[in-house]
Image (cartoon, helix red, strand yellow):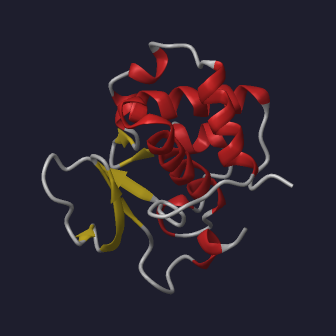
Amino acid sequence: MPRVKYTNSDVDLMARMMRAEAVGEGKLGMLFVGNVIVNRAKADCLDFRDVRSIPQVIYQVQGGNYSFEAVQKGNVFYNRARTAEKRLAKKNLDYWRDHPAKFALWYFNPYAPCPQTWYGQPFSGQFKNHCYYEPEAGTCDSVYMG
């Protein structure tokens, strides 16, 4: 059973997002970004109570801006999803999660050392240029489920 319900167009959209956000960090970096996308769709807490589908996660607006830089700047739309990225997205959607993004709901590239917290959320680890953050203990149990 997949971690979240999805369609073929969800796989395509997620694959394009993973590529736009982390192609420079290789397959593993794209999988970590995919973890965050799926975790947000599963998280029934914090800023993610009203996002249950992959398109809702990707096009979510917070504070007047799209949550993901690749949507704000439009580069998620520049390239079609390739078979390799679609395979990675499907892997995330079906089962794959790993540290540091296993339970992460946020990531960003600080262009500097990773801060220990980001908007009050604890640092869970770093992969290449991206810092990952999971919810503060006891604030989002749903992200730790399946």
Q: Residue furthest left?
A: 112
Q: Residue furthest bottom?
A: 138
Q: Nearer the viewer, residue 67 or 2?
A: 2
Q: Position of residue 4 (x, y in %)?
A: 75, 52
Is 123 left or right of 91, judged from the image as shown? left
Q: Point out the image quarter for the C terminus.
A: bottom right
User: Is residue 114 positioned above or below 81 on the image?
Assistant: below
Q: Position of residue 92 (x, y in %)?
A: 65, 47
Q: Position of residue 137 (x, y in %)?
A: 46, 84
Q: Residue furthest right?
A: 1
User: Is residue 99 positioned above or below 121 on the image?
Assistant: above
How many badges with numbers are in the image?
0
Is 128 left or right of 99, judged from the image as shown? left
Is 79 left or right of 130, judged from the image as shown? right
Residue drawn at 48 percent across, 28 percent down: 19
Q: Point out the image quarter for the N terminus.
A: bottom right
Q: Nearer the viewer, residue 7 or 28?
A: 28
User: Is residue 53 positioned above or below 44 on the image?
Assistant: above
Q: Position of residue 78 (x, y in %)?
A: 44, 13
Q: Nearer the viewer, residue 25 or 114?
A: 25
Residue drawn at 72 percent across, 26 percent down: 9
Residue drawn at 51 percent across, 53 percent down: 36
Residue drawn at 73 percent across, 54 percent down: 95
